[in-house]
């Protein structure tokens, strides 16, 4: 028999402290407290605070980047946990925002069922989270590598010196930069230190790429997706599948498109209905990789090129790209949930 919750706990979590509130089955506050979080293993003692309600409670906490230790700890101890989207909770709308008010409001809305209905978000397990971090770390390091490259180009441009290679973080570019001497020792030292930092960053990017390729090759699901999806390498496949997560959690194609922020904004009042730009309120990493995939297909696939040419007659190229990205996402969702082979023509409606 399914256990019915008699207490509902709302948690407002921070780095060094948490505020929690417990309400009963009538929505009345029965306990609330502010608890300091000790560093490292000593911080696990905070779970003792919830022990009196473990047999008949539900716990709700906001989805924030530093809460994984807390959510995992609750799950390991048998607590039913609901992770809520902070944007959909919109606690700031109350006007006066404090930790106590936030914890009370989270507990109250969990009791009412509002969080389950409107604000509940999917919580990835550690394996999926690790795959996400692997892809995101590589992307972050590529951005930093490019930032260092831009700094070096600006330094050379200031003295009208041509760079030794088009791509500065290539082997020939790094070798040429380290051989350069500028007008004084200070500038030369700065150039060489920036070059060494960029070279180290490039080595990290290459190592992460090798790790991603090994991860995709070892996972049957990712390996099969890489074989089916056109113009998709290991990095793109890992990013796409990890950012999408459990495809079975989406009820329909509109829901999966919404998860990537690829649905239009809607304003409706009485007889007025307006559909505007994309919401961009979903997973940013998912939207990014789909956009990159769409660009590649528009340049390499004859089938996509014909489809895009018709759309370009009335739409800007960026709108065509995002329309294609949405169709690709839905096609991948169908592939994962129904076990069908990915079909590009069906994605395009041909």
Image (tube, rainbow, N blue to C red):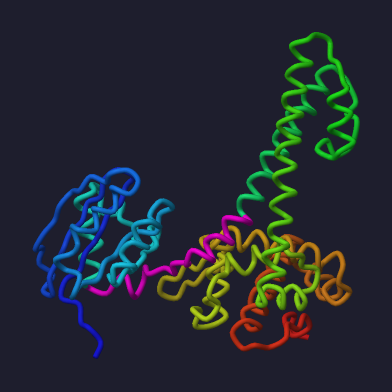
SS majority, magenta: helix
Q: For residue 295, what is the image quadrant? A: bottom right
The quadrant the N terminus occupies is bottom left
Q: Position of residue 26 (x, y in %)?
A: 11, 74
Instruction: Residue lying at the far front in this picture: please name it.
Output: 41
Q: Position of residue 114 (x, y in %)?
A: 29, 71
* Left or right, 213 with reference to 280: right
Number of marks in the rendered image: 0
Above or below, 161 relative to 47: above
Q: Residue at x 25, y 67 (%)?
A: 109
* Left or right, 127 with reference to 339: left
Q: Which residues are magenta?
A: 112-135
Closer to us: 86 or 223: 223
Q: For residue 64, what is the image quadrant? A: bottom left
* Left or right, 292 with reference to 88: right
Q: Residue at x 63, y 46 (%)?
A: 140
Q: Is residue 8 part of the magenta span, yes or no?
A: no
Above or below, 142 relative to 338: above
Above or below, 315 relative to 42: below
Q: Residue at x 86, y 16 (%)?
A: 181
Instruction: Residue lying at the far top in this picture: please name it.
Output: 184
Q: Position of residue 57 (x, y in %)?
A: 20, 72
Q: Residue at x 40, y 57 (%)?
A: 68
Q: Position of residue 123 (x, y in %)?
A: 44, 67
Closer to us: 161 or 316: 161
Q: Is residue 120 part of the magenta span, yes or no?
A: yes
């Amino acid at each position: 028999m399914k256990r019915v919750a008699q207490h509902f706990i709302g948690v407002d979590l921070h780095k060094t402290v948490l505020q929690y509130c417990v309400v009963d089955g009538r929505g009345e506050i029965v306990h609330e407290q502010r608890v300091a979080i000790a560093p490292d293993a000593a911080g696990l003692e905070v779970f003792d605070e919830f022990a009196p309600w473990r047999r008949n409670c539900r716990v709700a906490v906001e989805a924030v980047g530093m809460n994984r230790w807390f959510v995992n700890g609750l799950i390991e101890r048998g607590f039913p946990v609901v992770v809520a989207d902070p944007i959909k909770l919109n606690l700031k709308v109350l006007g006066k925002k404090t930790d106590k008010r936030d914890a009370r409001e989270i507990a109250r809305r969990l009791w009412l069922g509002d969080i389950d209905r409107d604000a509940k978000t999917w919580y990835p397990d550690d394996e999926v989270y690790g795959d996400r971090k692997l892809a995101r770390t590589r992307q972050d390091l590529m951005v930093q590598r490019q930032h260092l490259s831009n700094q070096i180009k600006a330094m050379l441009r200031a003295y009208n010196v041509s760079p030794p290679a088009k791509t500065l973080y290539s082997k020939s570019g790094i070798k040429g930069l380290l051989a350069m001497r500028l007008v004084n020792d200070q500038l030369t030292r700065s150039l060489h230190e920036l070059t060494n930092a960029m070279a180290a960053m490039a080595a990290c990017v290459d190592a992460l790429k090798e790790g991603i390729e090994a991860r995709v090759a070892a996972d049957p699901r990712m390996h099969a997706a890489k074989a089916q999806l056109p113009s998709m390498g290991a990095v793109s496949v890992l990013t796409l599948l990890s950012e999408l997560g459990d495809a079975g959690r989406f009820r329909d194609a509109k829901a999966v498109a919404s998860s990537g922020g690829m649905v239009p904004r809607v304003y409706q009042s009485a007889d007025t209905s307006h559909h505007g730009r994309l919401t961009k309120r979903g997973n940013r990493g998912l939207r990014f990789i789909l956009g990159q995939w769409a660009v590649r297909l528009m340049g390499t696939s004859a089938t996509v090129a014909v489809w895009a040419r018709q759309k370009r007659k009335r739409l800007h190229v960026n709108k065509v790209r995002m329309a294609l990205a949405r169709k690709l996402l839905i096609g991948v969702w169908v592939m994962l949930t129904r076990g069908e082979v990915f079909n590009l023509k069906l994605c395009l409606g041909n």
